[in-house]
Amino acid sequence: MDGDGGGAYGSHTAEDVFRDFRARRAGMIKALTTDVEKFYQQCDPEKENLCLYGLPNETWEVTLPAEEVPPELPEPALGINFARDGMEGKDWLALVAVHSDAWLLAVAFYFGARFGFDKESRRRLFNMINNLPTIYEVVTGITKKQSKEKTSNSSSKSKSSSKILRQGDQLTKAPKISPPKEDEESGTDEEEDEEEHENTLCGACGDNYANDEFWICCDVCESWFHGKCVKITPARAEHIKQYKCPSCSTNKRIRT
């Protein structure tokens, strides 16, 4: 595992550390959402104390803690596997998510101290981190609920029951996949619609909607996802009658 997150000691910026933070965060979100069944299986309570690590290449790893003292980086929560079968699957994932958020902050500010960040650099780093939803918010669906509340409170027109795919500046129609963008009667309505799209967060990685990305909506939980995050292409989506996201597909199989 690349523990340095930025190479040897030297000149590093808050932006460098934030890129490392974001990559590790993406890996841990994958473990707790799109790769949740694989993650669940690896956290066998019969094994020794295990930790969940987010890696700088946007992947994750469940392994034993580092042996050296002190470790190269702050260590994640130890023994996450022991609680797996003692609580509801969703509650266990939420608990791991909380500890993952704490670990990511510890790693980021460890680098900040190690690279000698001043007060302004630390503030800039925290602000960049704080602009992202936490892993806990992504895993528990809090960001989805907030997005729905913004949608329901907006003055945009009511949407039809059919789902759509978002790609580029247009909303591409597809069976069972979110509401087509209606013709707006005023510039204000168009601006509100654009703002609503920008406030939409991916249920897998937690990032905002972007015009140049393909999105798909789950028919069960009605959450939006980047196609790349759930490995769905526009061509494949055209043939899906009812799309279920990874969480909705696997939650039924995760039981105490």
Image (spheres, rainbow, N blue to C red):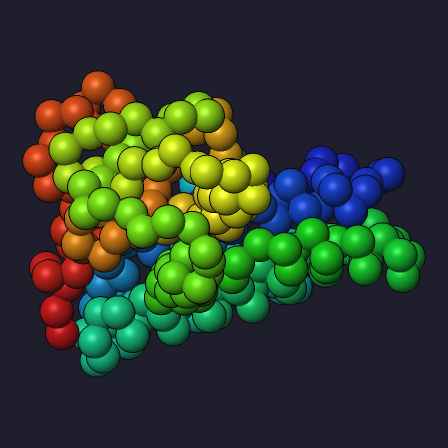
Which residue corresponds to the image point at 30% horizontal and 72% vertical from the top-left?
92
Percent position of residue 200, x then y: 45, 48
Residue 239 visible here = yes
Number of numbered discs: 0
Residue depicted at x 27% and y 61%: 43
The image position of residue 172, as x and y in percent, is 30, 26
In the image, is 75 to the left or to the right of 124?
left
Given residues 197 and 51, the one toward you in this image is 197
Query: Quarter holding the C terminus?
Result: bottom left
Whether residue 142 sits left or right of residue 255 in the image: it is right
Q: Position of residue 27 (x, y in %)?
A: 44, 45
Please tell me in which quadrant of the rendered image residue 225 appears: top left
Occupied quadrant, residue 181:
top left
Please tell me which residue is depicted at 19% across the width and 47% down the height of the picture: 161
Residue 223 shown left or right of residue 153 in the figure: left
| 189 vs 127: above or below | above
Q: Residue at x 71, y 36 (%)?
A: 7
User: Nearest the camera: 92 or 127?
Assistant: 127
